[in-house]
Image (cartoon, rainbow, N blue to C red):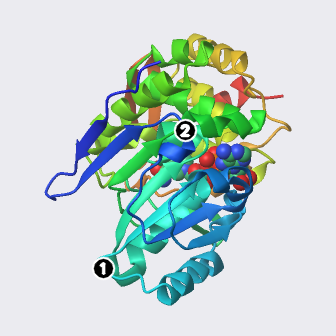
Amino acid sequence: MAVLAPLSFPWPGETMVSRVRHVFAPEEVESRADLLVIDATVETLWGARLLWNTPRVVIQGGEDCKTLSNLQKLWKAFSEEGINRESTVCVAAGGSLCDLGAMAASTWMRGVRLELVPTTLLCMVDACLGGKTALNAHGAKNQVGTFHPAEDITICSAFLSTLQERELQAGFSEAVKTALIGDPGITDCLKNRDFDGAVFRCLSVKGGIVIKDPHDRGIRRVLNLGHTLGHALEMLLPLSHGEAVALGMPAAARMGGGETFAREIAHVLSSFGLPVTLPRPVSVEEVLSLIRRDKKTGSAGRTWVVPRGWGDCSLVTITPEREEKLLEGALRVIRP
Ligand SMILES: NC(=O)c1ccc[n+]([C@@H]2O[C@H](COP(=O)([O-])OP(=O)(O)OC[C@H]3O[C@@H](n4cnc5c(N)ncnc54)[C@H](O)[C@@H]3O)[C@@H](O)[C@H]2O)c1
């Protein structure tokens, strides 16, 4: 097995570069952090193998960690450890705690240097790159956030050996999303359980897009494929983020009229063990009440990301009247 070549993504208009490196074992992760924020499960399973000697703040990861009180807990730790503009904070966790820890790093003294060590597949293939930070607030996902990219990202797929199957599948979902957006070959890596290959191909696609539109005003919005409906389903039903996105993708294809392609996407997702039917029926009204809070709503209507083929997605603005009708058809594709 070869060490994969590092990837490097320069941020437009800034001197900042996000670098992605690959190591085989946690002991090889190098860091210049002054403080490590670490997921409690990761600390228990892997903490002793992360060798650098910095103070640690341990927080239980998972969606529920993205709260204001945990943000305050991190600010308190930063204060106690004397974190300042010259300091570096590292987060070793899945996407939830990386979102929260990155937000803490982004807001402390208007921004301190950030490193990420993603420990879930979803975070490796997607959440670790691109600079989005987030908290959930007022019943909506990622309602509060900033842009604050990590300068160093270290990929070590050994962490995946302790991940529960359901969490692994959540990563498959975001990786299939990236295959639909820009690199169909990613699905072969997943079939062969070549996680390093899948991660590097996913990050190449995502990085290539985010550096063209770092603040999510144009082309970057294709990365939201499956998320418009997915976020609503995640709020309504007992689904993980990845499962909800998996249900959102065939539905998005159907929103664009592609019933056959919707079924093909569903078939690929189910081959990775992902759900392709809802755990219970949901109504258009239930979904719309949540989707209306979506950040991607403009005056002409909402922008949906519609997959038309592998590696071929477009942004389509749909008026409220058409949206209701199309959504009915989309929910039919994934009905129980
Ligand atoms: N910022 C972004 O661009 C971006 C992109 C996609 C998703 N996200 C966010 O990512 C979050 C989902 O993240 P996730 O799927 O990585 O899961 P997660 O961070 O919620 O973690 C899921 C569970 O796995 C555990 N875990 C983490 N690493 C482990 C390991 N190596 N072994 C065993 N258990 C481990 C955690 O403790 C937690 O219980 C969502 O909040 C989503 O909004 C952010």
Q: Amino acid at mark 2?
A: Ala
Name above or below for residue 260 compared with residue 334: above
**Which of labels 2 and 1 is toward the front?**
2
Q: Is residue 180 left or right of residue 233?
A: left
Name above or below for residue 74 compared with residue 51: below
Residue that numbered label 1 is attached to = 85
Residue visible at 54% across and 24% down?
253
Density class for disc 2 (Cα within 10 Å; few <14, some 14-19, many ≥20) is some
| Marking on residue 312 | none
Q: Nearer the viewer, residue 312 or 286?
A: 312
Q: Nearer the viewer, residue 80 or 50?
A: 50
Q: Position of residue 292 (x, y in %)?
A: 56, 57
Residue visible at 46% across and 54% down?
116
Q: Position of residue 206 (x, y in %)?
A: 37, 36
Quadrant holding the C terminus: top right
Q: Is residue 242 left or right of residue 162?
A: left
Q: Position of residue 98 (x, y in %)?
A: 53, 58
Residue visible at 70% across and 56% down?
62
The answer, for residue 232, to whether it is visible in the render is no
Look at the numbered disc 2 and give the secondary structure of its residue: loop
Residue that numbered label 2 is attached to = 25
